[in-house]
Image (cartoon, rainbow, N blue to C red):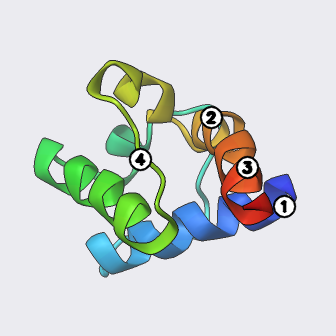
Amino acid sequence: MSDLEVKNIVLGIVAVVSPDADLSNIKGDVRLRDQLELDSMDFLDIVMELRKRYKVEVPKEDYPRLATLDGCVEYLTPKLVAIAAK
């Protein structure tokens, strides 16, 4: 699974959680919550969608690693690759 595919997965989930968000100019190194005005419940919804759709478990202590789009891609790529290989 490529970085671009993981990025699209994350953006697809964000689009469901926050349908009014403008995803056209998302910067990879800026916190998603700052760019999209996501609150803590929106963030938890993103984590829950990852678990529901892709069986990815994200422990609470790893939440900060998902703060930016780049961080999401870095953190999720090996997890999604491992799940796909099963």
Q: CA distance from mark 4 to mark 3?
A: 30 Å
Nearest to N terminus: mark 2 or mark 3: 2
Secondary structure at numbered mark 4:
helix
**x then y, percent, for residue 20:** 30, 79
Decide: few, some or many residues near mark 2? Use Cα within 10 Å; few <14, some 14-19, many ≥20. some
| SS class, disc 2 | helix
| Residue 70, image quadrant | top right
Asked whether, in this view, residue 17 is left or right of residue 79, the answer is: left
Identity of the residue drawn at 70% across and 35% down: 74
The residue tagged with tag 1: helix, strand or loop? loop
Judged by depth in the image, the label closer to the viewer, 3 or 1, is 3
Name the residue at the front extreme: 86
Residue at point 33%, 42% (across, down): 33
* Residue under label 2: 75
- The mark found on residue 35 in the picture is 4
Give the distance between the C-alpha atoms of the residues marked 3 and 1, in whole angstroms: 10 Å
Residue wearing tag 1: 1
Disc 4 residue type?
Gln
Label 3 residue SS: helix
Q: Nearer the viewer, residue 15 or 22?
A: 15
